[in-house]
Amino acid sequence: MRIIVNGETREVGNQLLSEILIECGYRQNHFATALNGVFVHKHQRKSTRVMSGDRIEVVTPNAGG
């Protein structure tokens, strides 16, 4: 299915947000996620279904000053 991750169109084979994140290379748990502009808590990722055309935003912390 075709979705948008951080503004980039991606083809993915999963429907669960947690699996899509792994498929896209996000293996650690130190990031925030939003689905179609709505925050998704890390504990909800395994039960959150993504549909074709949905937008996922992934924000990772950036250390520095």
Image (cartoon, rainbow, N blue to C red):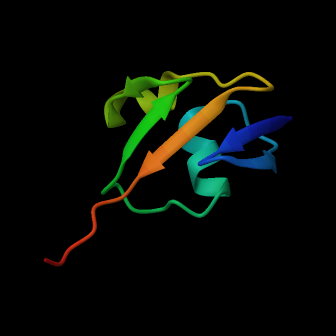
The residue lying at 71 percent from left, 30 percent from top is 15
Q: Residue at x 27, y 68 (%)?
A: 62
Which residue shows up at 42% across the image and 39% down it? 33
Q: Residue 50 appears at what percent x and percent y? A: 66, 25
Q: Residue at x 39, y 27 (%)?
A: 40
Q: Nearer the viewer, residue 61 or 27?
A: 61
Work out which quarter of the rendered image holds the N terminus and state it.
top right
Instruction: Give percent across and percent down for residue 23.
Output: 67, 55
Left/right of residue 45 with respect to residue 12 in the rendered view? left
Q: Is residue 63 left or right of residue 54?
A: left
Provide residue 29's location: percent of width, then percent of height: 34, 55
> As drawn, is 6 to the left or to the right of 23?
left
User: Residue furthest toward the left?
Assistant: 65
Question: Quick check: 5 left or right of 31?
Answer: right
Examine the rendered structure and indicate whether residue 39 appears above or below residue 63: above
Q: Quadrant of residue 32?
A: top left
Q: Position of residue 51 (x, y in %)?
A: 74, 22
Q: Is residue 58 above or below residue 25?
A: above
Q: Disc count in the image? A: 0
Q: Residue placed farthest to the bottom in the image?
A: 64
Of 50 and 57, nearer the camera is 57
In the rendered image, the quadrant that contains the C terminus is: bottom left
